[in-house]
Amino acid sequence: MSGIFMKLWTALRGAANEAGEAAVDANATRILDQEIRDADRELREARIALAEMMGKQSVEQNHLAEKRAKLEEYADYIRRTLAKQKEAEGAGRTAEAAQHGALAQEVAAKYAEQEAIVKASENVIAEYGRNIDVLKQKITAGEAAIRTLKQRADTVKAKQHVIKASAAVAAASSGTDTHARSALESLERIERRQEESLAQMEAANKLAAETSGAALEERLRKAGILPGTSAASDVLARFQNEAAGRMPGQAS
Amino acid sequence: MSLGTLFKVLARDAKDTLVPPPPRGAIPPEPLKLRRGGFLEIDPLPFRMLAGRANFELGRNAQPIAARGLVDLNGSWLHRYYLDDDETWLQVKTDGGTDDASVSECILWQYWDTKTPANLSELKEIAGPQSEIGLPTYEVGAFLYQRVWGASRGQTELVRFVEQVFDKSDTIPSFSCQHHAMLYRRPIEESSRQEYVLISVEECPDSLAVVTSIGVDVSPADLTVT
């Protein structure tokens, strides 16, 4: 028994699967269109994300400019302080020279810190740049993929129209054949019937001619009961007789 | 990574970044992460290097932001941050927007002098036509400053603007002050920075004062906001 249930279950699953596939096939172009629209929308969102990243890179570049300016300012401080130190040393102002030397040392430490900050900022900008390049490439590839998809979808739709149109023409032409054949058959049938009717009529005429009044008349005429083709000569003879002094109808 | 996965990742990131900021009414967002309650550190080295060549002397270089002031200049904004010492304040000017990229000027100020006139005649004496405020040059300490606003050869009119002050809420101003101000500046010797003098007749709900502040250019790179 369980074997039967298994087979029934498999059959049911098969039917459900076929129904699903049929529904998908029936809406294939609609589904394709929606998928293309979804991909398009996601690509638009990707472009927004890319623009955002480029904006962040631009802001970081502005910060880098400020940080570099600060580094340059520190460099200027060091140069000036060292110059003052040298001047003080030259003038024999040892304490002042030591003060300038200490300050130069301190500024140099700040310079090193600032240099590291500038380097970090440059790395961040480079990282943004790499990500931007990758994103740009992927978006370009995505755009190309969608373009191809659209073209293929258009081709599929065009083919479907051709198939529909061809099917309609085929159906129409097959219908025309049937109708034409049927009309021809009818014509032949009518013609055949007409021929039969004509033949029947001829036969009936022959028969009627043998049995009808025409044959009787002919016989009566032959018997002289009915006036025949000689009637005219009879009339003429009668009037010839009258002119000869005999009364019409009077036998000679 | 397949194209489908790429799209999903990109879409997710885009959605994350596109979440709109919470509504804050007409109050514009603040630049450089500055905010009331934030902690501002200022690089002291540039101020040490100016020693002896400027009136400005930096006191505490790291302190909390106690209050915020905002001035609408029709397309530009002045964002003012008053620090905890009641002596120092930072002004950031933004043009166009209010994000970091729109920052066009940063000046660190400290109060130099405050005069409180008792009546109108005293106010006229301090800031009226007979005063030096509005003349082409103005002297503070050992330095002479050039007027920035106005083109008159003589005394020019003070510039009026309104400042909203936020000291209890970030979105609702506690009060507004009306300023009638004049700006002066001078280049600092052996430096690319300039020093400023701002004289302002400040009319606040509970006070009227003529306040003189001294300021120095700062770069956003001089500031660390936590």
Image (tube, coloured by chain):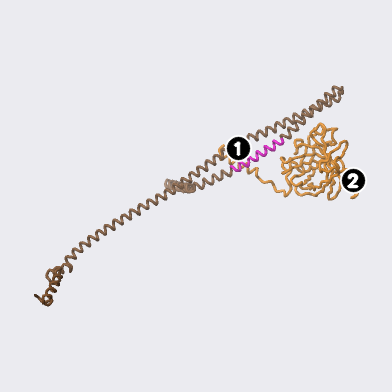
Chain colours: A brown, B orange
Quarter of the view holding residue A51? top right
The answer to whether tags 2 and 1 share a subunit is no
- Left or right placement of residue A160 versus residue A202 in this view: right
Q: Find out whether residue B221 is within the magenta segment.
A: no
Residue labelled with disc 2: B130
- Figure check: A118 above or below A237: above
- Residue at 87% x, 42% y is B113
Task: Kindly check if marks 2 and 1 are in contact, taking CB atoms under 8 A apart as contact.
Answer: no
Left or right: where A251 falls relative to A183: left
Q: CA distance from mark 2 to mark 1?
A: 65 Å
The answer, for residue A9, to whether it is visible in the render is no
Q: Residue A220 falls in which quadrant of the image?
A: bottom left
Three-letter code for the amino acid on which mark 1 is drawn: Lys
For the residue carrying disc 2, how many other residues have a C-alpha within 10 Å: few (<14), some (14-19), or many (20+)?
few
Say which mark, if any, is on residue B205. Answer: none
Residue bounds of the magenta highlight: A43-63
